[in-house]
Amino acid sequence: MNVARLPVELELKLAVRPQDVDALAAHPLIARYAGAAAHTQPMLAHYLDTPGRALAAARLALRLGCEPRQCTQTRNT
């Protein structure tokens, strides 16, 4: 498997006031993707922690995300 050819997942989480959504969508870095075809792929996510919830106490999350052909492990803060 050629790791250099694997797609990279980029996840953005934005907190936007409803009245600012149009301005955000018009921003050049976002607007250039407006005409792009959407690609969806099902993913099943499992969030893991210790029995004592040590990760949650440290404000961390460990996710095992499984797609049809692969699983990835990520740490979120």
Image (cartoon, rainbow, N blue to C red):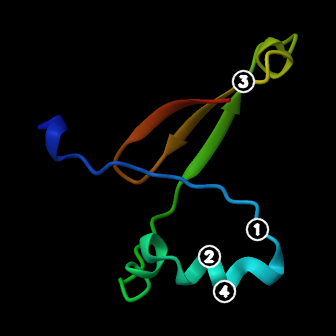
Quick check: 19 above or below 57?
below
* Residue in view at x 45 percent, y 52 percent: 10
Task: Quadrant for residue 39, please give it.
Answer: bottom left
> What amino acid is found at the position of numbered circle 4 in the picture?
Asp
Whole-number angstrom distance, CA of label 1 to CA of label 3: 24 Å
Separation of disc 1 and disc 4 at Cα? 10 Å
Secondary structure of the residue carrying tag 3 is: loop
Image quarter in which the C terminus is found: top right
Task: Tell me which label, 1 or 4, sits earlier in the chain.
Answer: 1
Quarter location, residue 28 = bottom left
Q: Which residue is mark 3?
A: 60
The mark tally for this picture is 4
Q: In the rendered view, does 41 fall on the left or right side of 46?
A: left
Closer to the chain start, of discs 2 and 3, is: 2
Instruction: Give the residue at mark 2.
Output: 24
At label 3, counting other C-alpha atoms closer than 10 Å, the crowd grade (few under 14, some 14-19, many 20 or more) is some
Mark 1 and mark 2: span between their CA atoms?
A: 8 Å
Label 2–label 4 contact, CB within 8 A = yes
Please tell me which of labels 3 and 4 falls first in the chain.
Answer: 4
